[in-house]
Image: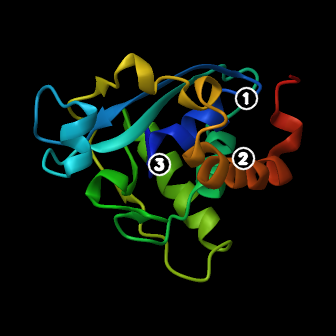
Amino acid sequence: MLAGGCFWCLDAWYRTVRGVLAVESGYTGGHTEHPDYYSVCEGTTGHAEAVAVVYDREQIGAETILDMFFVMHDPTTLNRQGYDVGTQYRSALFPRSEEQLGLMQEAIERNQANWAQPIVTSLEPLTNWTAAEPEHQDYYAKHPEAGYCQVIINPKLSKARQYFASWQVPA
């Protein structure tokens, strides 16, 4: 479970990665039992927009998945990704086990060298995961011409391709 700002960006990237079996956009880390997009966007539920990434460990490792996460967003800005501001856009990792917690801590330390400012990505308990509404699943593929996709997502995808081109599934 990874939160790096708007879930549309992470969803768009991980769906193209070799070894990723499934991506689901959703909400986690909050106190409301049944959050929806509008309540999360208001910033009153405590949830973060996040993605659940399921991958084949025989094809890709957790370290690579996490390194991609740190390229796909700015982990040094507290509760903000570009124009998206609020705790719902925080940089956060939600481990499911002690093993994942360790891998995530190592990823933060490893990726700090790539950033001039301190990484503020939080490690939070995984609570209240709720899948986002169907219109938010695979949003980029459904709306590639939308302004947000053109202005925000496309540059992030271009940056990720520079670092991880060998992991892209051929189109």
Answer with mark 3 or mark 1, whichever residue precedes in sequence.
1
Give the percent coordinates (x, y) of residue 46.
18, 48
Neighbour class for label 3 at 10 Å: few (<14), some, many (≥20)?
A: few
Give the percent coordinates (x, y) of residue 142.
59, 23
At horizontal 82% and vertical 32% (from top left) the residue drawn is 168
Q: Are marks 2 and 1 in contact (CB under 8 Å)?
A: yes
Q: Secondary structure at mark 2?
A: helix
Q: Which residue is mark 3?
A: 102
At horizontal 34% and vertical 21% (from top left) the residue drawn is 133
Neighbour class for label 1 at 10 Å: few (<14), some, many (≥20)?
A: some
Q: Which residue is mark 1?
A: 16
Q: Secondary structure at mark 1?
A: loop
Distance from label 2 to label 1 (Cα)? 10 Å
Indicate the quadrant where residue 58 lies. top right
Q: Mark 1 is on which residue type? A: Thr
At horizontal 28% and vertical 34% (from top left) the residue drawn is 37
Answer with mark 2 or mark 3, whichever residue precedes in sequence.
3
Which of 151 and 75 lies nearest the eye of the viewer?
Answer: 151
Locate residue 135 relative to residue 156 in the image: left or right. left
Q: Which residue is mark 2?
A: 157
Q: Considering the image in quadrants, where does the C terminus appear?
A: top right
